[in-house]
Image: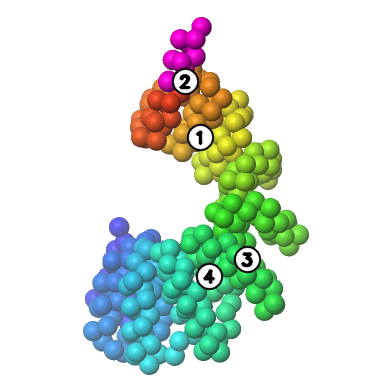
């Protein structure tokens, strides 16, 4: 737990530093207490303190508090700038409030402030969470027009937006742009691309991306592997699903509910009910008990029973 000696460090800078530290550790309530302490002395409440608390609330998914504090900052006659607007937009993005995030983004332009890469990334991320893939791509296009180079965060958010919109071609196009720009893809970028291919029922492309990710020496994570399993499930590739589950174990990546669910569903689709039961038992041994898997298993059992009765 964060330890802060408020009585020893009452200055504006120290309050700002402590609030930022709370934000990094997602202790938004502690950050708010510190901000309230600072508010008791008008001289210690600076724009930096406001921006730090807005960011802390955003990371804690307290977007309402973040916007209220942003409004309070402006009422205190502090001049809004790109950093404060970006902090508010980022808080809205994390709270899945894409309309509010874009409203702040447009307000920034109306105030004759030029959005930076962080501002655009916050807007694109908000669009991704709101499943607004067209708006996300429009913002990426605006970045180029503004002579700003999208970074990994900007592109990853755009790819995520395409994945949620089931636009796998656009997702792959963005991945290609990242490679052309010599950007180093991270796990989020790869996973979003794999997910986009899975939702587009492009299981071969999804597994190819997963393979490329491993060849890039990135540590496999359950989110990317689960996206690959989802692709196998949608493509009815139960054998490939089993291979991937086995590879996860070899790479010491613990499959989760979603991973097993995709594997069981893939087996169920191909009427491999016995294999589905084995996966179900393995899942139970790992203390995972999701209702959705039970439903899939029940369907698999029913298919197996019907198959056996016909023999």
The label nearer to you, 2 versus 4, is 2
Q: Residues within 10 Å of mark 4 (few under 14, many from 20)?
A: many
Indicate the secondary structure of the residue bearing disc 4.
Answer: helix
Indicate the secondary structure of the residue bearing disc 2.
Answer: helix
Query: From mark 3 to mark 2, how far is it between C-alphas?
Result: 44 Å
Identify the residue under disc 1. 262
**Residue 107 tag number:** none
The label nearer to you, 2 versus 1, is 2
Mark 2 vs mark 1: which is more N-terminal? 1
Mark 1 vs mark 4: which is more N-terminal? 4
Q: Residues within 10 Å of mark 3 (few under 14, many from 20)?
A: many
**Along the line of sight, which residue is nearer the eye, 82 or 5?**
82
Name the residue: 58% across, 27% down. Answer: 238
Quarter of the image holding residue 250?
Answer: top right
Identify the residue under disc 2. 303
Query: From mark 2 to mark 4, how far is it between C-alphas?
Result: 47 Å
Q: Indicate whether residue 253 is drawn in magenta.
A: no
Identify the residue under disc 3. 137
Tell me the magenta residue range.
301-311
Quarter of the image holding residue 297?
Answer: top left
Residue situated furthest right in the rendering: 180
Q: Position of residue 81 (x, y in %)?
A: 49, 85
**Residue 123 tag number:** 4
Q: Residues within 10 Å of mark 2 (few under 14, many from 20)?
A: some
Dot 2 and dot 1 residues touching (CB under 8 Å): no
The label nearer to you, 3 versus 2, is 2
Left or right: residue 269 versus residue 281 is right
The label nearer to you, 4 versus 3, is 3
């Amino acid at each position: 737990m964060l330890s802060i000696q408020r009585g020893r460090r009452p200055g504006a800078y120290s309050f700002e530093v402590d609030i930022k530290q709370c934000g990094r550790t997602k202790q938004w309530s502690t950050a708010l207490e510190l901000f309230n302490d600072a508010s008791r002395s008008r001289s210690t409440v600076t724009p930096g303190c406001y921006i730090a608390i807005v960011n802390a609330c955003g990371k804690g998914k307290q977007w309402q508090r973040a916007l209220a504090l942003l409004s309070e900052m402006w009422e205190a006659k502090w001049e809004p700038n790109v950093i404060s607007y970006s902090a508010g937009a980022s808080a809205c993005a994390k709270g899945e409030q894409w309309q509010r995030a874009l409203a702040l983004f447009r307000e920034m332009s109306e105030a004759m402030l030029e959005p930076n890469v962080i501002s655009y990334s916050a807007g694109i991320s908000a669009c991704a969470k709101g499943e607004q893939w067209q708006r996300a791509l429009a913002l990426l296009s605006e970045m180029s027009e503004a002579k700003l180079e999208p970074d990994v965060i900007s592109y990853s958010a755009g790819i995520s937006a395409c994945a949620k919109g089931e636009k796998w071609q656009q997702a792959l196009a963005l991945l290609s742009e990242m490679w052309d720009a010599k950007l180093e893809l991270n796990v989020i970028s790869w996973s979003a691309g794999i997910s986009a291919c899975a939702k587009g029922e492009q299981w071969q492309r999804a597994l190819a991306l997963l393979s490329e990710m491993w060849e890039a020496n990135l540590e496999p994570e359950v989110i990317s592997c689960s996206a690959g399993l989802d692709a196998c499930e949608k493509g009815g590739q139960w054998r490939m699903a089993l291979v991937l589950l086995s590879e996860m174990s070899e790479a010491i990546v613990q499959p989760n509910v979603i991973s097993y669910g995709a594997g069981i569903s893939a087996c169920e689709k191909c009427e491999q009910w016995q294999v589905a039961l084995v996966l179900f038992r393995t899942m139970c041994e790992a203390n995972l008990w999701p209702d959705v898997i039970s439903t899939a298993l029940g369907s698999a059992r029913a298919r197996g029973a019907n198959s056996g009765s016909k023999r």
